[in-house]
Image (cartoon, rainbow, N blue to C red):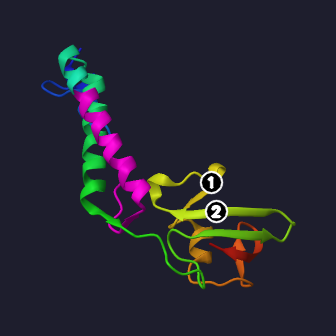
Amino acid sequence: MSKAFTKEQEGSDVYDELPERPVSSNYLVTERGLKMIDDELAALNEAHAEALAEDDKQRLARINRDLRYFTARRATAQLVPPPDQTAEVRFGNKVTIERDDGRTQTFTIVGEDEADPSNGTLSYVSPVAQALMGRSVGDLVAAGTGEAEIIEIR
């Protein structure tokens, strides 16, 4: 069978073709977020050495892609100090909202890699965080398919 009809390409490794992870151009982080990046880079460097020693090409390809991603994240990270005011929602504030269905939720607005809504953190680029930014207690904002009122900013 002709090589043209096979998936393998001479001199190419399928694992080198993993898609790159997208990196934002405007990347804000908290102190915790910066530490998370540094910890991830340390773990990846250790894993890289292990995979290299084991000659695990598939693992190396995945680790190399993640190293490129977190190295770019670290290089472009803009550390934002904790906000010193609570008049308006800013990056790093903890915000409590009451949704129109009566649910009360509290979120801290953080960087993209720190976000975990189920644990109370929202990425500053998420639609809800974007609706909250610059708003004050008492303001109504779009939240999902309904509205929410900002009831506290810390």
Residue 100: in magenta span = no
Quadrant assignment, res 145: bottom right
Q: Considering the numbered disc 1 on the image, is that residue within a helix, a strand or a loop?
A: helix
Q: Nearer the viewer, mark 1 or mark 2?
A: 2
Q: CA distance from mark 1 to mark 2?
A: 7 Å
Relative vertical location of residue 104 with respect to residue 11 in this rendering, above or below: below
Q: Is residue 70 visible?
A: yes
**Which circle marks residue 107 in the picture?**
2
Crowding at dot 2, Cα within 10 Å, few <14 / some 14-19 / many 20+, comes out as many
The front one of 145 and 31 is 31
Residue located at (56% from left, 78% from top): 133
| Amino acid bearing label 1 | Pro
**Which circle marks residue 117 in the picture?**
1
Q: Which mark sits nearer the N-terminus, 1 or 2?
A: 2
Quadrant assignment, res 99: bottom right
| Amino acid bearing label 2 | Phe
User: Which portion, as a residue range, is magenta?
Assistant: 20-48
The front one of 8 and 113 is 113
Q: Is residue 7 visible?
A: no
Residue 151 coordinates in the image, percent (x, y): 75, 76
